[in-house]
Amino acid sequence: MGDAQLQAEVLNQALPYIQAFRGQTFVVKYGGAAMRDSSLLNGVIRNVLLLQLVGIRPILVHGGGPEIDKWLERLGIETKTLNGLRVTDEATMEVVEMALAGRANKALVAEIAKAGGKAVGLSGRDAHLLTAAPISAELGRVGRITRVDPSILKSTSEAGVIPVV
């Protein structure tokens, strides 16, 4: 079977799924550990753009633990954990926001643009997207999401722009 035949067969097999999920929203999680592997980045971006191309509304949700760790170390801020969770005081929270909203998020938006797509970077603070409650006083600013307001995600997706959160 030639390349063209194989590609046609793959598309033929995918068609029922494309039809079933057209107009639906998919949340794609791109975790911090995966973000360390730059060889995965192009594939993730291409797949997100392909979802959009076939009529699915992707939302790209990223991590950034390694980016946070890198910046905490650069700034000389000691990392503390409790039961596998980062203890997040005010100084650590400033670095977390910078690393996630200012670095990781904007880098992904730029990669989507470079690949020919449109994206907008959002953080949980933007448009009251996420509301959270503290897990415990010992963990500081670590919380559990209690509410998601999808309106900004919906309007962004409907405008043909991929939200990156």
Image (cartoon, grey):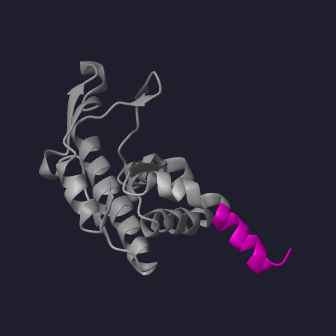
Q: Is residue 145 above or below residue 54?
A: above
Q: Which image quadrant for residue 86? A: top left
The segment highlighted magenta reads 1-12
Total residue callouts: 0
Per the image, is 112 magenta? no
Q: Which image quadrant for residue 141? A: top left
Query: Is 154 in front, or is 86?
Result: 154
Image coords of residue 162 (percent x, y): 33, 64
At 25% from the left and 28% from the top, the residue drawn is 140
At 19% from the left and 42% from the top, the residue drawn is 149
At 41% from the left and 37% from the top, the residue drawn is 79
Query: Is 131 in front, or is 1?
Result: 1
13 vs 152, left or right, is right
Per the image, is 10 magenta? yes
Image coords of residue 105 (percent x, y): 35, 60
Image coords of residue 64 (percent x, y): 42, 50
If the image is split into quadrants, where does the N terminus sit?
bottom right
Magenta segment, principal secondary structure? Answer: helix
114 vs 92, left or right, is right
Residue 54 makes an appearance in the image: yes
